[in-house]
Amino acid sequence: MRINPGSTVTLRYVLMDEGGQVLSESSEPLTFTVGDPEVLPAFQEALMGLSAGETHTFTLSPEEAFGPYREELVFRVPRAQLQGLSDEGGEELRVGDVLQLYTSSAPEAEPILAYVTQVDAESVELDANHPLAGKALKYQVTILEVV
């Protein structure tokens, strides 16, 4: 059976940057239904017509993947505004920590993840870009099952 809209697909993948460096790979098979909004549309499109047992390699542009890197999503916040924020162990914020921010206090407000990129005595620099924004992504997928 070939992959079509509405198919349920089980696959393994290796995700690489343009240079072929492995960024991640599936430890367990990934199963999803084609059309699932949680899976990149261009990723799903690249699988169309494949069958179980096939291996396929393709590259998604930054626009097809997680979008371009946007400088306006990098901003500094005075440490005083983040007072009381620390990781679970009670330590101060460190480069690499991830904060969940809200654009409003409304109950329906969607959270935004922001990555701590710099910390100094006065402020904290946050980056709300997806970690893979601005990068072309190369996938190697092996189709295990199509239903």
Image (cartoon, rainbow, N blue to C red):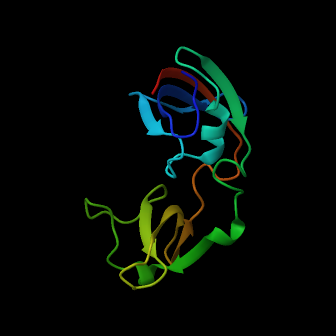
Q: Name the residue at 45% across, 38% down.
A: 32
Q: Quadrant of residue 85?
A: bottom left
Q: Is residue 97 left or right of residue 50?
A: left
Q: Estimate the x, y position of residue 31 in percent, counting from the top left.
A: 42, 34
Q: Estimate the x, y position of residue 141 in percent, counting from the top left.
A: 57, 25
Q: Name the residue at 43% across, 58% down.
A: 97
The mark total stands at 0
Q: Name the residue at 52% across, 76% down.
A: 123
Locate the C terminus by quadrant: top left
Q: Nearer the viewer, residue 100 or 11?
A: 11
Q: Nearer the viewer, residue 58 or 72?
A: 58
Q: Estimate the x, y position of residue 102 in percent, counting from the top left.
A: 44, 76
Q: Is residue 99 left or right of residue 68?
A: left
Figure check: 8 above or below 76: above
Figure check: 116 above or below 61: below
Figure check: 88 above or below 8: below
Q: Nearer the viewer, residue 63 or 46?
A: 46
Q: Nearer the viewer, residue 122 or 142?
A: 142
Locate the N terminus by quadrant: top right
Q: Name the residue at 25% across, 59% down.
A: 89
Q: Quadrant of residue 110?
A: bottom left
Q: Estimate the x, y position of residue 18 in percent, counting from the top left.
A: 72, 34
Residue at the outermost left position: 89
